[in-house]
Image (spheres, rainbow, N blue to C red):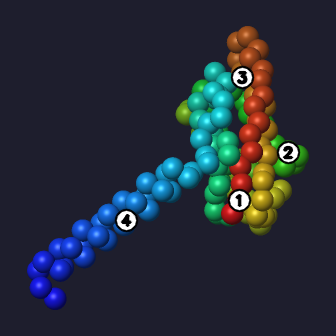
Amino acid sequence: MDDRRARILLIALGLLFVAIVLAAVALNEGGDAEPLPEAVERVSPRPGDAVIPQSEIVVDMQAGYDLQIVVDGLILSGDEVEVSTATGVHRWAPSDDNTITEWVPGTHTVVIRWDKVSGLPDRGSYSWSFRVQ
């Protein structure tokens, strides 16, 4: 194969790669449909996201809030949720030791309820759904 053919082949492969990436971004249905409440800084997976079965739920709250997580109608035990009180990050994933042992394909709904640890009460709740592929 001469140099000219090799260059054309590499350019074509590069353009194909760019087209695939652009199509994946354009067809992605995820994203925030509505703004998050003030006390909630970030949730993952985001509302409407499609995720793999190994995914975990991450809720990043402002520091100083207690949080309860409900997945598909089941209240998660505080022992199951990994909490970083300094940063307000709460993490949970299905496991053999948890209320939910694995994600089944389909839509899952998460409800979070919070209240301020000290000072004036600041109760609230937020819910969203995502899909497991």
Which residue does the image show at 12% across and 85% down from the upper left? 2
Q: Which residue is mark 4?
A: 17
Q: Secondary structure at mark 4?
A: helix
Which residue does the image show at 85% across and 45% down from the upper left? 75
Q: Amino acid at mark 4?
A: Phe
Q: Secondary structure at mark 2?
A: strand
Q: Secondary structure at mark 3?
A: loop
Residue 107 vertical placement versus 53 (above, below): above
In this view, the mark in front (3 or 4): 4
In this view, the mark in front (2 or 1): 1
Please report whichever mark, 3 or 4, sits nearer to the chain's N-terminal start. Answer: 4
Q: In the image as oriented, which residue stretches furthest toward the top?
A: 120
Residue 97 vertical placement versus 3 (above, below): above
Q: Amino acid at mark 2?
A: Ile
- Confirm or deny contact between disc 1 and disc 3 (CB under 8 A): no
Which dot marks residue 75?
Answer: 2
Q: Quadrant of the N terminus?
A: bottom left
